[in-house]
Amino acid sequence: LGDRTWLAHGIHFDDDEIARLGAAGTAVSHCATSNMRLASGIARAVELEAAGVPVGLGVDGSASNDGSNMMMEVRQALYLQRLRYGAAAVTPERALDWATQGSARALGRSDIGVLRPGAQADLAMFTLDELRFSGSHDPLAALLLCGAERADRVMVGGTWRVLDGRIVGLDVPQLIAHHSEAARALLARHG
């Protein structure tokens, strides 16, 4: 254990283990959707954080989270942790912090997870002009509680990778066709 270690899921720690993780600076990547899909448990994220454990979010992998949508993961973590600790303890801001600054702390990175000069220019922008967002007074709460399914724009390291909801330079229909054919071939071979 140490500050260069992070553990996925973190759902079965007892109080002593949480204290040891905090003392060591070991991080936990909370994978709420995967844990719900597998019915494997609920991370004690608030208690981990209180003990000094950096808590980040992860989408796990397609074996246990078919969507791999980080904003959906933030939403699921918000709801799952509210189930354990209540709405007052787990706000949209706290859940977003787990996804951004918490994940950066888990990786030992000070150049990501924040918007400031000198940091990586990683941005995700969402439009709020859909009916489901109307009447909202808090944009972050609207994104998480109403469900942000697709980013309108995404910048990674200062380069636009998604514009108007489309991945730049990627032929999505061709990729879907290739993926579908690979899945059919795999299923035919291994039934």
Image (cartoon, rainbow, N blue to C red):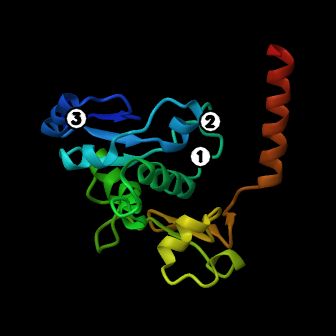
Relative to 116, 78 lies left or right? right
Relative to 74, 101 lies left or right? left
Q: Earlier in the sequence, mark 3 or mark 2?
A: 3
Can you say which quadrant of the picture contains the N terminus? Answer: top left
Q: Amino acid at mark 3?
A: Ile
Relative to 115, 72 lies left or right? right
Residue located farthest toward the left when viewing the structure as drawn? 23
Q: Which residue is mark 2?
A: 62
Q: Classify mark 2: helix, strand or loop.
A: loop
Can you say which quadrant of the picture contains the C terminus? Answer: top right
The answer to whether marks 2 and 1 mark residues whose Cβ atoms lie closer than 8 Å is yes
Residue 36 spot, x, y in % from top left: 55, 38
Relative to 83, 38 lies left or right? right
Q: Earlier in the sequence, mark 1 or mark 3?
A: 3
Q: Which residue is mark 1?
A: 68
Most foreground residue, 190 or 137: 137
Residue 73 spot, x, y in % from top left: 52, 51
- Res. 49 mark: none
Q: Amino acid at mark 1?
A: Ser
Most foreground residue, 137 or 104: 137
Most foreground residue, 153 or 38: 38
Residue 19 sits in which quadrant?
top left
Identify the residue at image location x=44%, y=62%: 157
Q: Amino acid at mark 2?
A: Ser
Q: CA distance from mark 1 to mark 3?
A: 27 Å
Identify the residue at image location x=60%, y=65%: 148
Most foreground residue, 84 or 23: 84
Q: CA distance from mark 3 to mark 2?
A: 28 Å
- Res. 18 mark: 3
